[in-house]
Structure formats: C-alpha cells, structure tokens
Image (cartoon, rainbow, N blue to C red):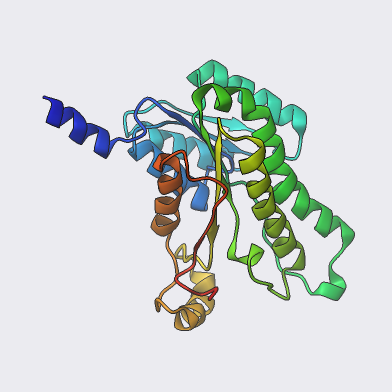
C-alpha cells in the first residue's frame, strides 16, 4: 500500500496543490496549464481577450480530474489583478504555484520604435508579473509557495529588432532575482527563459528551419520542453531560488 501511494505521488507530485497561470488560454500558457493539471494541480488560468480559447482549455484541464477555472484579468491593471486573485481564493481556496506567463512580443526597428510601444511592452511583461506576484503574496506565503516567471532568451541576448521586448524580459529576469531575495524564505522565485520555440505555426516554418540549423541541439524547442522546465521549478526543492533557466538548446551560447 505504501509503495502504491509513493508511486501515485511520483505521478501526481502536485496533487492537493493549486496553480495559477496568467495568459493560460493558449500557446505556451495553455501547455503549462495542462502540464500542471496532469501533475495533479487544480488550475486557474487568466486571459484578457481569448475567452473562447480559455473555455476550451478549462474543459481540457478538467479532463485530468482536477478543478479548473478561467478568469478574465488584465495584468496591467491592479484592480483587475486584485479581483481575479480574490476570485481564485474563493473558488480554489489556496495558491501554491504562480506562473507569470502573460506577455507581449513584437518586432520593431529601433529608430521607429514608439514610446507607446515601449510602455505597453513593459506594462505587460514587467509590471504585470510584479503586480500579480504582489497581490498573490498572502496566499503564497501561507502555502510556502513558488513563483515562476516566464522570461526569454531575448532577456539574456540582444535582438536588434526587439529592443523593447528584450529590455522588458531582462528586467523580468532581474525582478526574479530581487523577488527571490525579498520573498525568502517563505517563497521560492525562479524564471524559465525559452529560446526559439516551435509551436507548429505554418507561417513561421521557414524561420524555424533556419533557427534549428543555428541551434547546437539541431532543433527548436517545443512546448513540452518549456513545460518540463516549469514543472521542475514547481516541484524542485524549495532551496532552489533566484535562478534563470534558459530552455534554448544551446542557442544562447
């Protein structure tokens, strides 16, 4: 009996835990949400405009036998963030893992980059994780939980046509390290920094082929690669904190 329970725990290491993934309706956020649910966690996802995708994702999450909810939340807006977390506390009762995934990405020539584009990128990519984390502190401290920020290889390496994106992600990496110190010992804070991730989009196939040839592992990353890194930080020893883990196949070397 004891062996069966141990085996069950190893298959469902997050059973009895609750995870929140911002921007969890689609793409990497959806993949992370499904991975956490498969590991046994009850899951809340937030979305801003992707309501239909969020509803479909909740159905898929529930198929793992966990509780799942989707809530509209604008991570730029403190009132929206506060209301969403209050509802999550009411629906799911606790918070153990926060994945700050909601983010913007775009390209722009440096000389044409507008102040509005710069401010919007930082509002979502840097201010958003700060606001959500700050409002989640009470629940996370109670559970001795974990915060996992979604950074980017662009926060570690300069990309000339993504100055605002790279700067916002570099700031998120530093925010991770600051939070790891500021919120210890109750909360562990780490960051996953994906490189080029192939999500099977036909319009990006030529670019993906080119990048795979430049990557030491001779392929691009997958949603499963990123999800595995998130699950590592969600289940790793609490002693691991302040780390930025590049999931890039060696592209950043």
* Residue in view at x 65 percent, y 51 percent: 103
Who is closer to the viewer here, 200 or 230? 230
The quadrant the N terminus occupies is top left
* Residue in view at x 38 percent, y 36 percent: 37
Judge whether 191 appears above or below 161 on screen: above
Judge whether 173 appears above or below 39 on screen: below
* Residue in view at x 62 percent, y 28 percent: 136
Residue 39 percent coordinates (x, y): 34, 38
Q: Is residue 168 shown left or right of residue 195?
A: right
Who is closer to the viewer here, 121 or 7? 7
* Residue 52 seen anywhere in this rendered image of the structure: yes
Who is closer to the viewer here, 190 or 72? 190
* Residue 44 seen anywhere in this rendered image of the structure: no
Residue 50 percent coordinates (x, y): 59, 43
Which quarter of the figure has residue 133? Answer: top right
Residue 249 percent coordinates (x, y): 44, 70
Q: Is residue 40 shown left or right of residue 132?
A: left
Q: Is residue 6 shown left or right of residue 40?
A: left
Judge whether 141 appears above or below 73 on screen: above
């Amino acid at each position: 009996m004891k062996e069966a329970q141990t085996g069950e725990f190893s298959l469902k290491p997050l059973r009895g835990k609750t995870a929140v993934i911002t921007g969890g309706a689609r793409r990497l956020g959806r993949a992370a949400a499904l991975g956490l649910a498969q590991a046994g966690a009850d899951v809340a996802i937030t979305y801003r405009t992707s309501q239909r995708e969020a509803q479909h994702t909740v159905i898929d999450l529930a198929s793992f036998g966990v509780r799942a909810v989707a809530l509209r939340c604008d991570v730029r807006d403190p009132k929206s963030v506060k209301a969403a977390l209050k509802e999550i506390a009411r629906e799911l009762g606790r918070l153990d893992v926060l994945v700050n995934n909601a983010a913007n990405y775009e390209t722009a020539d440096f000389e044409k980059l507008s102040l509005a584009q710069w401010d919007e990128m930082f509002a979502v990519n840097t201010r958003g994780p700060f606001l959500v984390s700050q409002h989640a502190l009470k629940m996370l401290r109670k559970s001795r939980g974990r915060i996992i920020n979604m950074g980017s290889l662009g926060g570690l390496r300069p990309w000339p046509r993504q100055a605002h994106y790279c700067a916002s992600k570099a700031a998120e990496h530093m925010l991770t390290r600051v939070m790891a110190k500021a919120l210890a010992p109750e909360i562990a804070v780490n960051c996953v920094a994906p490189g080029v991730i192939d999500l099977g989009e036909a319009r990006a196939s030529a670019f993906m082929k080119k990048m795979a040839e430049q990557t030491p592992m001779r392929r691009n990353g997958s949603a499963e690669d990123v999800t595995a890194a998130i699950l590592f930080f969600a289940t790793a020893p609490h002693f691991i904190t302040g780390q930025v883990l590049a999931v890039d196949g060696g592209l950043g070397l």
